[in-house]
């Protein structure tokens, strides 16, 4: 409780400082609006619906990319993680691909798919898949071997073993990977919107900056920050629900 | 039941076809012979205890009987057929109950795992689960996670899950090794009454000689490097066994002495 009050006070302090700098015009108002003007721009954006549609656009890019990355990452990770042979053969290729910055594949994606939603989806999913896939591989590789013997003694089918033993056992790792990917997906959504001019907050921020509408620019940035914050909180809540059994340890 | 009737019954059982047979079973793992030329017959309904020094191959022998290992020589058969894979009528109680239970499922959920594997319809499961929890003395703990239970309770839960497969045979590997003396004695008596009621065949591995004699119809002592049978004792103590009376019985003390000397001779 004390911590929450303290962190709230720090945040309020930053906003106050920001207002002070803006009021004293230490930085030209053309570049730095005060929090009051940024807030007004935010409210105006919601009132006209302009900002709302941009927010929805970004949320869509992020969600589709992240979900695609989750499905593919968990499936591939499960496949690789549950077989020692697969790990031996595939792990080196993964180590080669993983450090590849996603920015490096953006030109490739644009060349192949054009400045389209499909390109954005591919880039976001490609960037967001790594934390999920690697966490899933680790989670599947770390399943208690005794549990597999229990499954053998019960003559459980392969799908039953995956869904009742391996997947729940790897779930804490998988969720941690999905949480990391959430941030990656948001960043890449903005990057793709800027590069491809797709409808979204990234595009809004870019246009506002070009037109020197600094209040609108800041409204967009605030909204991006809020998006990251809220999705991460939603993820923690989901984690806490799904991993309720861990809290009893 | 008189002692004589009991002996007659034992004689009749001896003439029955064995349920588990080790026929010159040999197991080599990583270039090492762990079990060599093991001949052993377990009769239906028998309570067989296996003792031996640490590392002599007790667990390995049990895993052969379970079908978790295949013999590299000779044969292990169950009910006349080669035991190549585990089967549902043979349940295994592992020593490390903490690892053998699903930590993300409650007590009821862990028992349900076996019922699901056996294809018990959903609507029959709650009654079966309640019945099994009652049998092992955990009726009030259905919604607890394993981490919320004591060691004794977790081992009870694992036994309940094994009973849920309705096994004809229970293979138990030092199931009470990690429990305190009081919990241990309570569980010994529970296992005896549970298996006697359903006429379950039991192969029970332990390093506790008293426990082996107290529980068993027969006790086998293994010799190490490689594992083979060194001694075989029939336990003709009256049943039901009693923690005080049985352990003070002259026959119990005689067997204890014999087994103790054997184990001491194997440990130089
Ligand atoms: N997978 C394996 N590969 C190679 N050697 C093994 C393997 N499993 C067991 N052994 C060896 O086989 C021997 C018997 O092991 P086992 O676990 O059956 O002994 P145990 O009688 O159960 O001992 P304890 O009383 O300590 O449980 C030991 O020397 C052990 O080192
Ligand atoms: Mg052992």
Image (spheres, grey):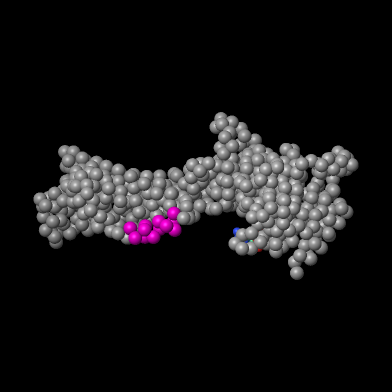
In the rendered structure, does residue A91 fall within the stretch colored magenta? yes
Residue in view at x 83 percent, y 59 percent? B258
Furthest-bottom residue in this view: B268
In the rendered picture of this protein, how many numbered marks are placed on residues? Answer: 0
Furthest-top residue in this view: B123
Side of A58 relative to A137 (left or right): left
Residue in view at x 27 percent, y 46 percent? A121
Write down which quadrant ligand 1 falls in. Answer: bottom right
Image quadrant in which you'd find residue B86: top right
- Which residue is more in the foreground, A178 or B67? B67
In what quadrant of the picture does the N terminus of chain B appear?
top right
Where does residue B208 sit, x and y in percent of width and height? 74, 57
Residue in view at x 64 percent, y 59 percent? B28
Where does residue B20 sit, x and y in percent of width and height? 71, 46
Where does residue A149 sit, x and y in percent of width and height? 58, 49
Find the magenta span and give its range. A86-97
- Up-down: is B182 above or below B134? below
In the rendered structure, does residue B227 fall within the stretch colored magenta? no
- Which residue is more in the foreground, B26 or A138? B26
Where does residue A34 sit, x and y in percent of width and height? 17, 53
């Amino acid at each position: 409780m004390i911590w929450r009050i303290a962190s709230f006070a720090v945040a309020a302090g930053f906003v106050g400082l920001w207002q002070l700098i803006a009021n004293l015009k230490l930085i030209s108002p053309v570049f730095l609006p005060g929090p009051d003007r940024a807030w007004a721009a935010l409210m105006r954006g919601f009132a006209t619906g302009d900002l709302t549609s941009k927010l929805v656009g970004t949320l869509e890019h992020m969600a589709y990319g992240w979900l695609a990355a989750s499905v593919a990452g968990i499936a591939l990770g499960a496949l690789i993680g549950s077989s020692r042979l697969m790990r031996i053969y595939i792990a080196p290729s993964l180590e080669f691909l993983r450090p590849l910055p996603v920015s490096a594949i953006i030109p490739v994606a644009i060349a192949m798919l054009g400045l389209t939603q499909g390109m954005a989806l591919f880039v976001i999913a490609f960037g967001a898949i790594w934390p999920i896939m690697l966490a899933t591989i680790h989670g599947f590789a770390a399943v208690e071997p005794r549990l597999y013997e229990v499954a053998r003694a019960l003559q459980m089918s392969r799908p039953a073993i995956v869904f009742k033993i391996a997947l729940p056992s790897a779930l804490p790792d998988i969720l941690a990977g999905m949480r990391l990917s959430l941030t990656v997906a948001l960043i890449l959504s903005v990057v793709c919107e800027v590069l491809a001019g797709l409808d979204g907050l990234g595009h809004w921020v870019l246009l506002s900056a070009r037109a020197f509408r600094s209040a609108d620019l800041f409204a967009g940035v605030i909204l991006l920050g809020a998006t990251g914050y809220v999705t991460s909180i939603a993820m923690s809540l989901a984690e806490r629900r799904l991993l309720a059994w861990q809290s009893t340890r | 039941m008189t002692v004589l009737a009991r002996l007659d019954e034992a004689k009749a059982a001896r003439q029955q076809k064995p349920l588990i047979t080790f026929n010159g079973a040999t197991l080599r793992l990583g270039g090492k012979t762990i079990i060599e030329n093991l001949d052993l017959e377990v009769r239906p309904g028998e309570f067989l205890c296996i003792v031996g020094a640490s590392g002599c191959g007790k667990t390995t022998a049990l895993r052969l009987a379970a079908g978790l290992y295949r013999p590299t020589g000779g044969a292990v058969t169950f009910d006349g057929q080669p035991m190549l894979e585990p089967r549902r009528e043979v349940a295994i109680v592992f020593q490390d109950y903490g690892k053998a239970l699903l930590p993300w499922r409650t007590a009821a959920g862990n028992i349900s795992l076996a019922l699901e594997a056996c294809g018990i319809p959903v609507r029959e499961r709650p009654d079966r689960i309640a019945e099994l929890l009652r049998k092992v003395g955990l009726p009030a703990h259905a919604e607890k996670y394993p981490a919320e239970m004591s060691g004794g309770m977790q081992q009870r839960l694992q036994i309940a899950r094994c009973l849920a497969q309705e096994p004809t045979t229970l293979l138990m590997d030092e199931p009470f090794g990690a429990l305190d003396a009081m919990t241990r004695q309570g569980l010994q008596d529970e296992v005896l009454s549970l298996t006697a009621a359903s006429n379950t065949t039991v192969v029970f591995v332990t390093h506790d000689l008293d426990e082996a004699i107290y529980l068993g119809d027969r006790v086998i002592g293994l010799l190490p490097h490689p594992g083979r049978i060194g001694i075989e004792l029939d336990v003709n103590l009256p049943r039901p066994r009693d923690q005080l009376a049985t352990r003070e019985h002259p026959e119990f003390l005689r067997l204890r002495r014999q087994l103790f000397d054997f184990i001491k001779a194997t440990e130089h």
